Image: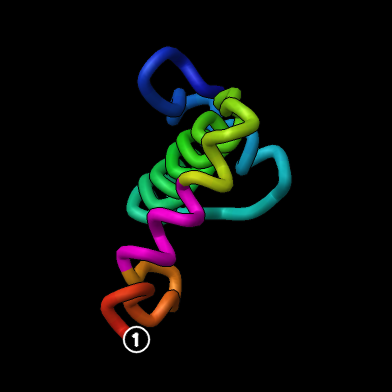
Amino acid sequence: MIQGNGIDKAALAQVVAETGVRVTPAELDALATSLERIASAAAMLLQPISIDETPESFRRQLEGGGAGGGGGEAAR
């Protein structure tokens, strides 16, 4: 169903039709968009990271006030 840069909407329509569910073209477009977003998020999560990258990123978020960090040093 996913071809290169996007979802093969004809294949998606066939899969949906085989389930017995009727959808409008707008609903099919929305489904394809959702699947593309899910695939993109999965690709980002599957990227390898170094063991030092995660703690360093977390520290930067805390210092910058991201993720509810309250501003880090500036908040003290």
Considering every residue shown, the one lying at the far top of the view is 4
Residue 19 relative to residue 39: left or right: right
Q: Residues within 10 Å of mark 1 (few under 14, many from 20)?
A: few
* Region in magenta: 57-64
Residue 18 vs 57, above or below: the answer is: above
Residue at the spot 58% in from the left edge and 34% down from the top edge:
52
Residue at the spot 59% in from the left edge and 31% down from the top edge:
14
Residue at the spot 39% in from the left edge and 25% down from the top edge:
6
Residue at the spot 37% in from the left edge and 73% down from the top edge:
72
Residue 70 vs 54, above or below: the answer is: below
Residue 38 vs residue 11, the one in the foreground: 38
**Residue 59 x/y as whole percent:** 47, 56
Is residue 7 located in the magenta-colored stretch of the structure?
Answer: no
Q: Magenta span: helix, strand or loop, mainly?
A: helix
When asked about the image quadrant of residue 70, the answer is bottom left
Residue labelled with disc 1: 76
Residue 35 relative to residue 61: left or right: right
**Residue 44 x/y as whole percent:** 50, 34
Is residue 61 located in the magenta-colored stretch of the structure?
Answer: yes
SS type, badge 1: loop
On-image quarter of the C terminus:
bottom left
**Residue 2 x/y as whole percent:** 51, 22
On-image quarter of the N terminus:
top right
